[in-house]
Amino acid sequence: ETGVTQTPRHLVMGMTNKKSLKCEQHLGHNAMYWYKQSAKKPLELMFVYSLEERVENNSVPSRFSPECPNSSHLFLHLHTLQPEDSALYLCASSQVTGVTEAFFGQGTRLTVV
Amino acid sequence: AQSVTQLGSHVSVSEGALVLLRCNYSSSVPPYLFWYVQYPNQGLQLLLKYTSAATLVKGINGFEAEFKKSETSFHLTKPSAHMSDAAEYFCAVSDRGGSQGNLIFGKGTKLSVKP
């Protein structure tokens, strides 16, 4: 398998649930990212990891908790979300941080009910 | 602060017609600029990028963009639209200029292609 793979593709969760989004890259990249894509809003960068260390956290609420156990895997742990958190969550990777070409996964469509 | 503005959230063209998607940027330092495309239910894919070399940049699928410093623009064009070009297109700029920082995206322009 090649590229950036995200699972699940779709997720419906209640506000009291705990769930996790998974991202895996098979490109040998050292940087990984979480983005949030909401309707009628620009893509929002949430977190940046470089060599498994978090290097950026763009004022994201604590109900979103990222984890990067190794350079190939990135998780986004979710708990006590709000309906306004419903969005497409995109994972991306790049060779290094900085503005090199980023490769995106297909995203997880999250609906909070 | 760096930013991009995409004029027109929705553009519709006929098959075979010229495609022009507009992007203007604001940057206090020499920018790196990008165009990405997103097909339905897919992630984003890089079309092309400007990194301070040639001002006319050619990308995949017949798209190209021209960096115009005097107009602070980086418009995306394709001479002849194809049905398969229907997608959403995003312009992006580096948030710290040059090769540093992260990508700041515009709100996107949805391109429709009529037969």
Image: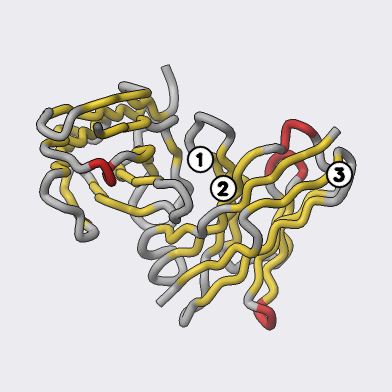
Q: Between A6 and B99, which is closer to the camera in this rendering? A: A6
Q: Position of residue B70 (x, y in %)?
A: 68, 83
Q: Earlier in the sequence, mark 3 or mark 1?
A: 1
**Residue type beneath disc 3:** Ser
**Residue type beneath disc 1:** Leu
Q: Between A22 and A97, which is closer to the camera in this rendering? A: A22
Res. B19 mark? none
**Which residue, given by chain and number where applicable, does mark 1 sit on?**
B44
Q: Position of residue B32 (x, y in %)?
A: 52, 65
**Residue type beneath disc 2:** Tyr
Q: Chain of mark 2?
A: B
Q: Position of residue A42 (x, y in %)?
A: 44, 55
Could you classify mark 3 by the number of other residues whose Cα lies within 10 Å: few (under 14), some (14-19), or many (20 or more)? Answer: some
Q: Are marks 2 and 3 on the same chain?
A: yes
**Which residue, given by chain and number where applicable, does mark 3 sit on?**
B80
| Looking at the image, residue B101 lies above or below residue A50 | below
- Dot 2: what SS? strand
| Looking at the image, residue B49 lies above or below residue A82 | below
Extreme-top residue of the structure: A1
Q: Earlier in the sequence, mark 1 or mark 2?
A: 2
Q: Chain of mark 3?
A: B
Q: Do the residues bearing badges 1 and 2 touch, measured as CB atoms within 8 Å? A: yes
Q: Residue at x 17, y 40 (%)?
A: A81
Q: Residue at x 86, y 33 (%)?
A: B115
